[in-house]
Image (spheres, helix red, strand yellow):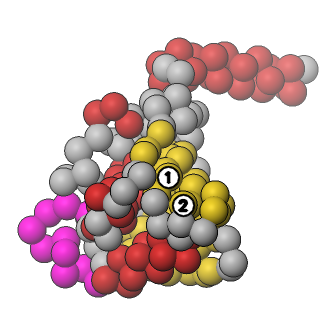
Amino acid sequence: MQSLVFCTLLAVFGASSAFLLGDGPVHASCKVDWTFGLSCDEVKTKIKAQITAWTSADNCANGGEKCLYTFTSEAATVLKATHSTPVKHYVDDLTFTFTAVDSSNCKVHGYSTSETWYAHLDYSTNYCNLNNLITGSALHQVAGYTETTSDKICTQYSTANCEKY
């Protein structure tokens, strides 16, 4: 009987949270796909360099979150890092997956997700975790640049203010 009550409550909570949160991800996270008119090695090098440049808290001094990135691992087609928020020190996990279209064009899938299990809304922080590295390394200015995401796969994307987050 207790398991029936628990399952019913879980179903009601799930339905109500889906209603309250809309069509976006249930957990604070973001998926973004980019294309760049550069080789994947060049793109990966630029993103990794930006993560390294923003490791310290120095860039947080005047507000914003272009700081506290930590490189965690690298494989042939994957780069992983974390980002900590400067005030509350919440940690988000970042993954960049690289797919070569040809020798001078690269597709990149970015994913950022909150390590905090109960995080539902994030004020676009997960989007900004990824976007700040792309704009910080000036990859958004390369020939062939495109970005694809939406509120359905990226928490609060349409209200993003990456100067703040």
* Disc on res. 35: 1
* Residue lying farthest to the front in this orientation: 103
Q: Earlier in the sequence, mark 2 or mark 1?
A: 1
Q: Amino acid at mark 1?
A: Thr
In this view, 62 is above or below 111: below
Q: Amino acid at mark 2?
A: Asn
* Residue drawn at the location 31% of the way across and 83% of the way down: 53
Q: Secondary structure at mark 1?
A: strand
In this view, 87 is above or below 47: above
Image spot of residue 143 (x, y percent): 37, 56
Q: Return the residue at label 2.
A: 105
What's the magenta region? 56-65
Image spot of residue 112 (x, y percent): 52, 55
* Residue drawn at the location 47% of the way across and 39% of the way down: 148
Q: Is disc 2 in contact with disc 1, using a CB cutoff of under 8 Å?
A: yes
Secondary structure character of the magenta stretch overall: loop
Camera-side residue: 140 or 87?
140
* Residue drawn at the location 53% of the way across and 66% of the way down: 104
* Residue drawn at the location 56% of the way across and 41% of the way down: 27
Residue 64, magenta (yes or no): yes
Q: CA distance from mark 2 to mark 1?
A: 7 Å
Image spot of residue 63 (x, y percent): 14, 63
Q: Secondary structure at mark 2?
A: strand
